[in-house]
Image: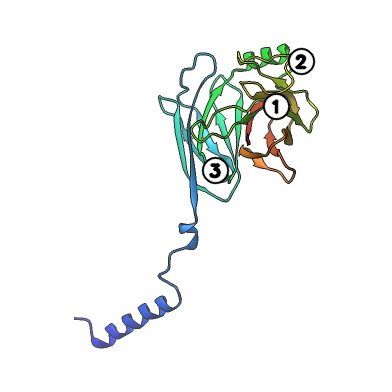
């Protein structure tokens, strides 16, 4: 049997640990977190893409898409901007800018293969879409109705600090050379953009806030990471 002296010693050790915080939880264990979930599909066939690798790069956390093209990465810090990278066989790399302020964590993305991207660039009057030193950016202006999280905002002009012209998409989803602002599609392509961190400005009479994007100090402007041979997605909600 344990002696009274030993019992008193164990009791003293326990009290000392409690007094010094030795039994407290690590604060990092209770830090607020968020998650990102979604699905990817082929832009032409609309079929889900299985087995693609999805990574929250800054955190080194990756997962694979299932047979429905769906994925989930949880435990992301809710106060940190991250980049979500997609790698799927037969497609260029994809990057989605995931801002800490994002309140809608779902990413539903249609991947375009390199051949189709090249066709888009030529429709827009260019020759190169992606290269060993350049990438492409798809930028979208979203509307704000709560019941339509993916509704587009028409009447927005966009510019990128690298100077490439904007290729606005028409209602068919193809570049429309005669179009100079967003329409019902509300998306813009920038081709052959020099790799690095770029700034995209939304010329709009109202207020735009980052949705899938990193914020910038300038109003209605977001930051995007462009990688060689890859496509970067950004979007803002414009009121």
Structural distance between the alpha carbons of marks 1 and 3: 23 Å
Disc nearer the start of the sequence (1/3): 3
Q: Which residue is more in the foreground, 212 or 47? A: 212
User: From the viewer's perspective, is 232 left or right of 193?
Assistant: left
**Residue picked out by circle 3:** 60
For image coordinates 50% across by 14% down, the residue present is: 45
147 up-or-down from 58: above or below = above
Image location of residue 115, percent across then percent down: 63, 13
Image location of residue 192, percent across then percent down: 74, 23
**Residue picked out by circle 2:** 126
Image quarter hosting the N terminus? bottom left
For image coordinates 40% across by 24% down, the residue present is: 67
58 up-or-down from 172: above or below = below
* Local crowd size for mark 3, using a 10 Å CA cut-off: few (<14), some (14–19), many (≥20): few
Could you tell me which secondary element the residue under label 1 belongs to? strand
Structural distance between the alpha carbons of marks 1 and 2: 14 Å
Disc nearer the start of the sequence (1/2): 2
Image quarter hosting the C terminus? top right
35 up-or-down from 161: above or below = below
Total label count?
A: 3
For image coordinates 60% across by 42% down, the residue present is: 99
Structural distance between the alpha carbons of marks 2 and 3: 36 Å
* Mark closer to the observer (2, 3): 2
Are discs 1 and 3 less than 8 Å apart at CB?
Answer: no
Q: Which residue is more in the foreground, 32 or 219? A: 219
Could you tell me which secondary element the residue under label 2 belongs to? loop
**Residue picked out by circle 1:** 135
Residue 85, located in which quarter of the rendered image?
Answer: top right
User: From the viewer's perspective, is 180 left or right of 70?
Assistant: right
User: From the viewer's perspective, is 16 left or right of 239?
Assistant: left
């Amino acid at each position: 049997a344990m002696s009274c002296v030993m019992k008193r010693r164990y009791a003293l050790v326990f009290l000392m640990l409690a007094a010094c915080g030795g039994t407290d939880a690590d604060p990092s264990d209770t830090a607020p977190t968020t998650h990102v979930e979604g699905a990817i599909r082929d832009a032409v066939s609309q079929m889900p893409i299985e087995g693609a690798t999805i990574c929250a790069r800054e955190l080194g956390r990756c997962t694979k898409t299932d047979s429905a093209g769906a994925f989930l990465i949880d435990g992301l810090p809710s106060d940190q901007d991250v980049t979500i990278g997609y790698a799927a066989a037969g497609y260029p790399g994809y990057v989605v800018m995931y801002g800490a302020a994002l309140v809608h964590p779902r990413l539903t993305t249609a991947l375009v293969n390199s051949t189709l991207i090249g066709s888009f660039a030529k429709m827009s009057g260019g020759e190169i879409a992606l290269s060993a030193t350049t990438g492409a950016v798809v930028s979208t202006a979203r509307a704000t109705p709560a019941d339509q999280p993916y509704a587009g905002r028409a009447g927005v002009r966009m510019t990128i600090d690298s100077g490439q012209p904007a290729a606005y998409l028409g209602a068919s989803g193809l570049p429309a050379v005669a179009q100079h602002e967003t329409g019902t599609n509300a998306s813009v392509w920038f081709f052959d953009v020099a790799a690095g961190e770029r700034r995209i400005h939304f010329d709009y009479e109202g207020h735009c806030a980052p949705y899938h994007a990193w914020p910038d100090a300038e109003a209605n402007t977001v930051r995007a990471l462009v990688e060689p041979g890859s496509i970067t997605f950004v979007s803002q909600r414009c009121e």
